Image (cartoon, rainbow, N blue to C red):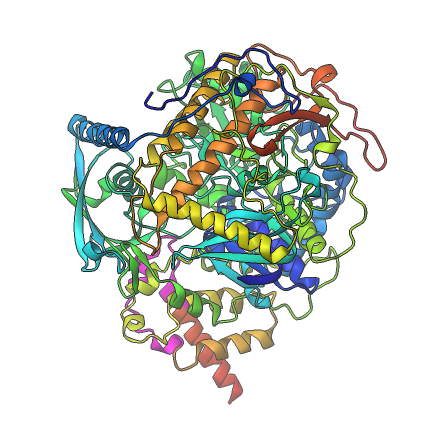
Amino acid sequence: MSTGITETEDDGTETQTQAVGAARAAGETYTEMDSEEIETANEEARRRTRELVEEADRTVKLKVFRFDPEVPEKEEPRFDTFTVPFSKGMTVLDALMWARDQYDSSLTFRHSCRQAVCGSDALFVNGRQRLGCKTQVADLADSGIPKKVRIEPLPHAEVVKDLVVDMEHFYDQMESVEPYFQGEDTPDGLEEQYQSRENREKVKMSTRCIWCGACMSSCNIAAGNNDYLGPAAINKAYRFAMDDREGEDLTEHRLNIIEQEHGVWRCQTQFSCTEVCPKDIPLTEHIQELKREAVKKNLKFW
Amino acid sequence: MHEHDVIVVGGGGAGLRAAIAAHEEGADVAIVTKLHPVRSHTGAAEGGINAALRDGDDPKDHAYDTMKGSDYLGDAPAIETLCEMSPEETIQLEHWGMPFSREDDGRVSQRPFGGLSFPRTTYAGAETGHHLLHTMYEQVVKRGITVYDEFYVTELATTDHPDPEERECHGCIAYDIKSGDLVGFEASGGVILATGGDGQTFDHTTNAVANTGDGLAMAYRAGVPVEDPEFVQFHPTTLPSTGVLISEGVRGEGGILYNGDGERFMFEHGYANNDGELASRDVVSRAELTEVNEGRGIEDEYVYLDMRHLGEERVVDRLENILHLAEDFEGVDGLDEPMPVKPGQHYHMGGIETNENGHTCIDGLYAAGECACVSVHGSNRLGGNALPELIVFGARAGYHAAGRELGEARIPTGPSARTEDETGLDTPVSPGAIDQPDPDAVADGGAMTADPTATVEHTLEGERARVEEMMDRDGINHAEIRSDLQDAMTQNVNVFREKEGIQDALETIRDCRERYQNVAVADPSRTFNTDLLHTIETRNLIDVAETIALGALAREEFRGAHWRAEHQARDDEDWLKHTMIAWNDGEPDLYYTDVLLDGEEKTYEPKIRSY
């Protein structure tokens, strides 16, 4: 062990505080590592990393976008390449975490649940929006493992640092569609609002959204028009507009919101959002359906 | 400095419910969370919410099941509060538009779950937590509640009275992840910790990377006892390669467990002759590992969970999400082949000691959800009881912090509730702080003042100094320390525990603590410095892991999730008591308190727990 701790066996001495572990009473001391010991420990860690890479049957090269406005050598965007030992079942997120923990602790990306439900790690992997945790490295090659995995932040969003993008605009759009249930005659107490299985099924896919932002990033319209609500926000509106528990007046109100200038009519049905959605939400279909509902509502009005 | 009436730390289920409650009560409330709320791990909960809603069911039956499931280590006032309030809180979610699964008549669906005497687990597909989280976040947006997202709370601002029960919490310090600024938050009404789990203390867990026990560690160092830390739930059905959870709903719907010999071992080897696969989680986890250890596993690692016989229609209707998880994270088509599963760390029953109003022994400091221990789960949590805990006790903490009268709490808190000391604990090394406590800084982060603003400012200065030091100096990276800690916990403080192994773990934890004295943050940036964030988290993991191992070493019996090789029976005579560990200014103090088995109308007599 590289630390200077003097270990003392439990001698049965108890102090009045009943602190667990009597060794403390014997005057334990601890000395911090000096700079030479730190350098030795860090060199040892680097050597172990090299060994792991050399011993690996197969490795994969990650080519990762780097940028940090605060660090001189990263002010100019660049790509760094990390060689990572490949193991069966390895996801792009696993590979990124390995690179960070073994090579460069400043490598920065959002991630949390590792199971495609928190929506933190939407990335641009080999030219397509994907969740890092849900993308098997092996699936990026036709057979075997890919020669290189290129990982970039989501396009059409401002890069904060490395793979982290500013999500504020996405959140603003999501929250602009009154994204909350507005029951008109909510029953009291333990009485439920009834909902048919069919109606629940109708909104089911739309409620799967995990706010990852992949759809917005893939959308050419959203890229060219910052005011466009975008697929995720319109899908959120769909989720409520189609829920029978909200009354007809509210449905009309919701249709008014999504048929505004920057709403559903901007969509040019390119299906890019639907293609990249990691939760398989038929976003384009939902947008089309809202267009039809808006037309019906307007006809009714006339 | 930001000032609010109530500060909620954490934006998952408990935090959101607490914030809504405080807002309903008229308080100016803010949520401070290291993730955006919809990223919280409540979203990964699959199974459902236990609530006695239907004819033929009764909150009293729910309470009985919960007490039995807890192996008689839950406190009756907490359990009865949970079960009585769960129906109204569950229907509240329905009123907020949560997309529950539905029966033919349009009412919310319920299904059977392990350890329940009635099918009372209310669900929304196999993604109940996702819908609960998003539904409550929608309500937070509707109310315009302030959310400081991607603000990481690093320390609580508490006064420094020598007696923790005389301390007051006036706020907290948070690191603004995007800007790199450390900022003070002052709360006149209270700080509610809702920071969730601490599964990152283990290396095979269903928990998120963000579940690092921050709230528990901060409360512990501020002087709040950690209650029953040794009780950690290992979920019997997690995917072997990642730890991703396969819901108990699969077994609730009729899924079957097979060993490598094709035997339905829960019955054929007599682990649970009545309930089989639907026995309590601890029972099933031990059964699986026993099968593997005795050579009847598959690849010496896992068993099979089969749901093929349920038919495609039923699986797609009720468990569709499971098909996606098995495919994406294990490469298995659950309609075509059985799914490999093994036990993985899932939930911490122990946590920050609170009463049934969510209040800790420190004035102004609350906790709710998984980070807290009120205690409803005792030594083992039943499936479907975590989500009602979030909404019931999240709401109670929010109301109470905002000033609503909830009646006198029956559960005592703080070291004054001590009934017995632990004096003979055989630890190989000293736990707690590395150095003798500094006599001028009694409580960790404490301030030598009674003035609220000055307390926050003093704590802020301390945190600035801590961060500056880690940023400026040369040192080692935290990641290897974290990884060694996780390995030691999984190796030695897992489903099966023995004295020597736990002692080995304590030695490794001590070694990790010493190495941590030399950590440094290599990333020099102030922008989104996750290197700094993870380094701070690792310290919290060390403190939490140590309480788990100490509790596991102390408790010489087999109760619920805590199994000891040397002590193969529940021992009510000596061990019908809560374990408490107080930080005691760096010299951990382990003591015991009474379990409250007296309910409103009856006393829960400990019975043999069989399924």
- Residue B172 image offset from top left, x and y in percent: 55, 52
- The foreground one among B537 and B454 is B454
Q: Is residue A46 left or right of residue B49?
A: left
Q: Nearer the viewer, residue B220 or B213?
A: B220
Q: Position of residue A18 (x, y in %)?
A: 64, 22
User: Which of A107/B296 is in front?
Assistant: A107
Residue visible at 30% across and 41% down in the picture: A97
Residues in magenta? A263-286
Q: Where is residue B203 drawn, in percent x and y?
A: 41, 30
Which picture quadrant has residue B17? Answer: bottom right
Check if residue A274 falls in the magenta segment.
yes
Q: Residue B196: give x, y in percent of width and height.
A: 54, 43
Is residue B561 something that shows in the picture? Answer: yes
Most distant residue in the bottom direction: A302
Q: Is residue B439 placed above or below B54 in the rendered structure?
A: above
Figure quadrant of the N terminus of chain A: top left
The image shows residue A88, relative to residue B521, as above or below, that is above
Residue depicted at 34% across the width and 35% down the height: B479
Classify residue B80 by image quadrant. Answer: top right
